[in-house]
């Protein structure tokens, strides 16, 4: 075992993040693996020391500096993990603890049965482009070492299961497996990556068990990559003597699209082109070759397309925060409460509408797609647009186009998206003038503003924001020191509109900027952070800024 009481992972607590400050604790039941879903193996992208971390300089050297300030150690980040695995500044692979393990993570989201966020310690493995066996072997070995260390500390059985929310959940699991049990939102990590290199959650459990079984140092044996498509089914391939015939078609009813019929399932799968499926002789789908679009790609496409139309980053962020609240920005998302009622999943509902097997799409009042379109005339409009383009109702481009048409047809909404001068303004406007959900409370507004902020910070261009480097001219330096304030147990808010503080601050701070929103101003810890995006400590009441 690599880690023990005397050799702990690197500690860099993310005390400035919303999750860290939520005060939520959990009773530890297991460990859940994530991987990030985007190509950036460096831990510094996500983890940076807090402004007041006593080891700040050391940690910055060790992790490297995120010059984009888009790390997750900020009040507007909704997600929070207990640890991260990836590359340090010198390129070595390591684990960094980001929150105490008893702190409840905001990692895997919610499914129909609940969430593994209550009980499973969670960490993210930073993904590279998924093509390097060396990097995979290094992070795989590190993740198994780290999980074994946690198992020992919390007396967890790596091969065990826990009865939770009516299902048996493995002590050691991953985001994708939790989602399949209805205990997380629909993500594919880590099952889209580990199997490329012959690994999966079963090998993870066995390797943890092996580590726990031996007291002395052991290392995980690296593996050669397996050359197989990653989305192959894991069920055993049937033998050649079977009477079953596997047909490859676009859809079962579309016999003309058939590419071939095969006795051996493996051969049918090999022949299955993108957007085609393999059907057994009864017409059941055995395998589908759907091009995999990552959530990251979906979100950047939505951002880029909307920005092209509205040319205002505040406005686009406000739209996206609301879309996130509605659908998680997943174009095939069907309103969750109807999934069980109608006996459909997001995928099967979409397929049934596309294939014409389900004819009630327009009138069933089930929210669907990016904006969770529900009213019959809007669903009809979406359906007609997709039909006219010959694409699925879940087609992302078609849904973006439909959304833009709807926004443009409503001049109030369009105007506030184009002319918004803050993320809050755009987010509130889109909520109350466009989405108009039943819940338009202050709480709902705050929640959506936070989502909108997350997108703003994720996608905004480098030069946006009111104070770029150049605009800080030499003569304004004197101005800066006037921004110094001394606080004495002053209420500190996560957003300008929060009613209750998340902590209280005393000591020397600086006004981050002069803008007053909802009677509050932003503060920061150092003079050089004034006006720097991502360096806001919190909001305080304007009267307290003396
Ligand atoms: Zn995940």
Image (cartoon, rainbow, N blue to C red):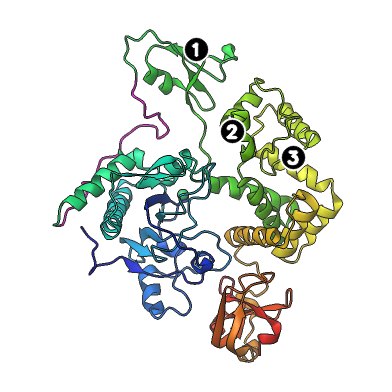
Q: Secondary structure at mark 2?
A: helix
**Residue at the spot 57% in from the left edge and 12% down from the top edge:** 255
Q: Tell which circle, 3 or 2, labels the residue nearer the N-terminal end.
A: 2
**Residue at the spot 48% in from the left edge and 44% down from the top edge:** 183
The segment highlighted magenta reads: 217-237
The residue carrying mark 3 has its beta carbon less than 8 Å from ligand 1? no
- 438 or 204: nearer the eye? 438
Instruction: Determine which residue is flagged by label 1.
Output: 282
- Position of 284 with respect to 438 (left or right) is left
Predominant secondary structure in magenta? loop
Instruction: Determine which residue is flagged by label 3.
Output: 402
Q: Tell which circle, 1 or 2, labels the residue nearer the N-terminal end.
A: 1
Q: Is residue 57 shown above or below 478?
A: above
Question: Which is closer to the viewer, label 1 or label 3?
Answer: 1
Instruction: Determine which residue is flagged by label 2.
Output: 340
Residue 327 percent across, percent down from the top left: 63, 45
Q: Is residue 261 shown above or below 327?
A: above
Q: Residue furthest left?
A: 216
Q: Does residue 229 belong to the magenta stretch? A: yes
Q: Secondary structure at mark 1?
A: loop
- Position of 342 with respect to 296 (left or right) is right
* Image quarter (top left, top right, bottom left or bottom right) of the N terminus: bottom left
Q: Is residue 127 shown above or below 44?
A: above
Residue 176 percent across, percent down from the top left: 44, 42
Q: Residues within 10 Å of mark 1 (few under 14, many from 20)?
A: few
* C-alpha span from label 3 to label 2: 28 Å
Residue 334 in sight? no
Q: Residues within 10 Å of mark 2 (few under 14, many from 20)?
A: few
* C-alpha span from label 1 to label 2: 24 Å
Residue 331 percent across, percent down from the top left: 63, 40
Circles 1, 2 touching at the beta carbon (< 8 Å): no
């Amino acid at each position: 075992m690599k880690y023990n009481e005397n050799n702990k992972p690197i500690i860099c607590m993310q005390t400035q993040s919303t999750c860290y400050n939520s005060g939520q604790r959990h009773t530890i039941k297991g460990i859940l693996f994530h991987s990030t879903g985007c190509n950036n193996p460096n831990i510094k992208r996500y983890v940076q020391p807090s402004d007041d971390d006593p080891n700040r300089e050391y940690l910055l050297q060790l992790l490297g500096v995120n010059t984009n300030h888009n790390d997750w150690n900020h009040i507007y980040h909704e997600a929070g993990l207990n640890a991260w695995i990836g590359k340090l500044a010198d390129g070595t692979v390591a684990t960094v603890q980001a929150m105490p393990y008893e702190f409840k993570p905001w990692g895997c989201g919610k499914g129909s049965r609940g969430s593994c966020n209550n009980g499973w310690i969670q960490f993210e493995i930073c993904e590279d482009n998924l093509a390097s066996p060396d990097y995979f072997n290094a992070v795989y070995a590190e993740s198994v070492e780290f999980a074994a260390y946690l198992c020992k500390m919390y007396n967890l059985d790596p091969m065990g299961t826990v009865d939770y929310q009516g299902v048996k959940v493995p002590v050691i699991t991953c985001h994708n497996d939790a989602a399949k049990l209805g205990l997380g939102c629909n993500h594919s990590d880590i099952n889209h990556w580990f199997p490329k290199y012959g690994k999966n959650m079963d090998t993870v459990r066995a390797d943890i068990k092996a580590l726990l079984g031996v007291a002395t140092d052991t290392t995980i044996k690296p593996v050669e990559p397996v050359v197989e498509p990653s989305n192959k089914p894991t069920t055993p391939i049937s033998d050649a003597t079977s009477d079953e015939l596997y047909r490859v078609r676009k859809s079962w009813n579309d016999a003309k699209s058939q590419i071939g019929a095969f006795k051996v399932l493996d051969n049918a799968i090999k022949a299955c082109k993108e957007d085609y499926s393999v059907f057994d002789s009864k017409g059941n789908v055995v395998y589908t070759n759907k091009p995999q679009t990552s959530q990251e790609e979906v979100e950047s496409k939505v951002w880029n397309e909307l920005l092209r139309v509205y040319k205002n980053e505040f406005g686009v962020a406000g739209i996206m925060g609301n879309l996130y609240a509605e659908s998680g920005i997943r174009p095939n998302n069907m309103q969750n409460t109807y999934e069980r009622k109608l006996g459909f999943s997001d995928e099967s509902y979409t397929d049934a509408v596309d294939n014409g097997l389900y004819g009630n799409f327009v009138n069933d009042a089930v929210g669907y797609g990016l904006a969770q379109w529900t009213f019959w005339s809007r669903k009809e409009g979406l359906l007609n647009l997709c039909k006219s383009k010959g694409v699925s109702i879940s087609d992302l481009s078609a849904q973006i186009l439909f959304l833009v048409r709807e926004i443009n047809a409503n001049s109030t909404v369009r105007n506030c998206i184009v002319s918004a001068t803050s993320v809050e303004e755009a987010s509130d406007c889109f909520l109350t003038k466009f989405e108009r959900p039943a819940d338009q409370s202050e709480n709902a507004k705050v929640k959506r503003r936070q989502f909108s902020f997350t997108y703003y910070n994720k996608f905004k261009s480098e030069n946006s924001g009111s104070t770029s480097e150049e605009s800080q001219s030499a003569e304004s330096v004197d101005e800066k020191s006037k921004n110094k304030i001394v606080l004495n147990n002053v209420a500190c808010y996560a957003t300008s509109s929060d009613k209750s503080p998340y902590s209280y601050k005393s000591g020397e701070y600086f006004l981050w900027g002069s803008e007053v929103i909802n009677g509050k101003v932003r503060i920061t810890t150092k003079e050089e952070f004034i006006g720097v995006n991502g360096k806001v400590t919190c909001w305080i009441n304007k009267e307290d800024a003396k």
